[in-house]
Image: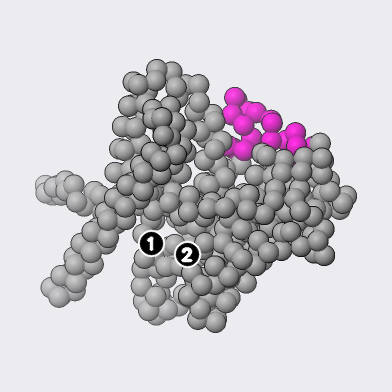
Amino acid sequence: MKNRKKFSVLDFFMEHREAPMLVILALFIVTVGVKIPGYFENNYINILKNCSLNLVMATGMLCVLLVGSIDISVAAVLELSAAVAGVLMRDGYIQSTVMMFAVGIGIGACVGLLTGVLMSRGRVLPIIVTLGMTYMCRALIPMDFILGMDKIARIDLADSFKDFILVKVLGLPLIVYITFAVVLLIGVFLKYSKTGRSLYAVGSNTEAAMMRGVNVNATKILAHVICGATAGMAGIMRLAEYNAIEKGACNGGEMYVIAACVLGGVSVMGGYGKMVGVVIGAVLIATIDSAIPQLFMDATMMKEFFKGILILAAILLNVVLQRVSEKRKKLKESAK
């Protein structure tokens, strides 16, 4: 009879780095539920809606972080994609919602492609490239000779586009189902496709990935294309949700996206991250933003304080687990 492997808490957390935040989310929900009876029963739909945009962008950010990169231009890409698609609808070039999404995703993917090429082929640090892209994307939005606009308003949009976001299926808004589809699609891609697994390989050990025949540059470019595409898609979702877009409409949004990934246990050094963790991180942020104002008078300060504490704790936990993992690998290699 084979001896069963003894359960180890450390091994469990190394395998499931998102688990601590899941526990914190559960405790937070219970605490708020006790303090404010019925709160989540009345507000869970709003929480899901509020985390949808960040979660869609976070799925793309996960791909970028897995290869050891980062993209701080996602909020600006969201704004540019929504603005261009809005102008095309305003001027009568687009009437269908499907085409709006196609344009938004296409613009985002193109920006992501340019970012990836500059980063991988030009050997420029991701933070520098995406910072430059942030300024470039936002600079395009108010330029009359390019977009002919200061902002897109409700009157500029077709009725069919404004109405689709109001559709509900089984009591949940359509935007939640769109988000679920994106999460499922990219989650399956990362877990089951050879290309998706290559993202993990590049982030874990670039040299080993190259020896296995992985095209590192192409993989990094693909990660940024996916990130740009999801940001563009989120732009159309935001335009539909608010019926307006302008420069600076999503200022700071990239920090929420990165925070969702970090809270979900995604390693900022690359090579580790799960889609379920990203979902937990996004829902946790949306829950804090929704519930904290009901618990504290100074809501803004307390929201940022809680998120800051959680992000620091998640990063420290990731660093510790990463070091333990590397130490174990070295011990195994030396034992051979």
| Magenta part of the chain | 160-177
Occupied quadrant, residue 144: bottom right
Say whether disc 1 or disc 2 marks the residue closer to the N-terminus. Answer: 2
Residue 28 marker: none
For the residue labelled by badge 1, is the local secondary structure a helix, a strand or a loop? loop
Q: Residue furthest right?
A: 92
Q: Which residue is mark 2?
A: 70
Q: How many marks?
A: 2
Q: Is residue 163 magenta?
A: yes
214 in relation to 28, above or below: below
Q: Mark 2: which amino acid?
A: Ile
| Residue 80 in sight from this viewpoint | yes
Q: Is residue 70 magenta?
A: no
Q: Give left or right: position of 241 versus 60.
A: right
Q: Which residue is mark 1?
A: 268
- Rendered-image quadrant of the C terminus: bottom left
Which residue shows up at 54% across the image and 31% down it? 46
Which residue shows up at 62% across the image and 38% down it? 175
165 in relation to 259, above or below: above
| Residue 198 in sight from this viewpoint | no
Residue 322 placement (x, y as % from top left): 27, 62
For the residue labelled by badge 2, is the local secondary structure a helix, a strand or a loop? loop
Compare residues 276 and 304 and report the one nearer the observer. Answer: 304
Q: Mark 1: which amino acid?
A: Val
C-beta proximity under 8 Å, tags 1 and 2: yes
Which residue shows up at 36% across the image and 48% down it? 308
140 in relation to 78, above or below: below
Q: Give left or right: position of 13 versus 189.
A: left
Compare residues 164 and 303 and report the one nearer the observer. Answer: 303
Which residue shows up at 41% across the image and 44% down it? 304
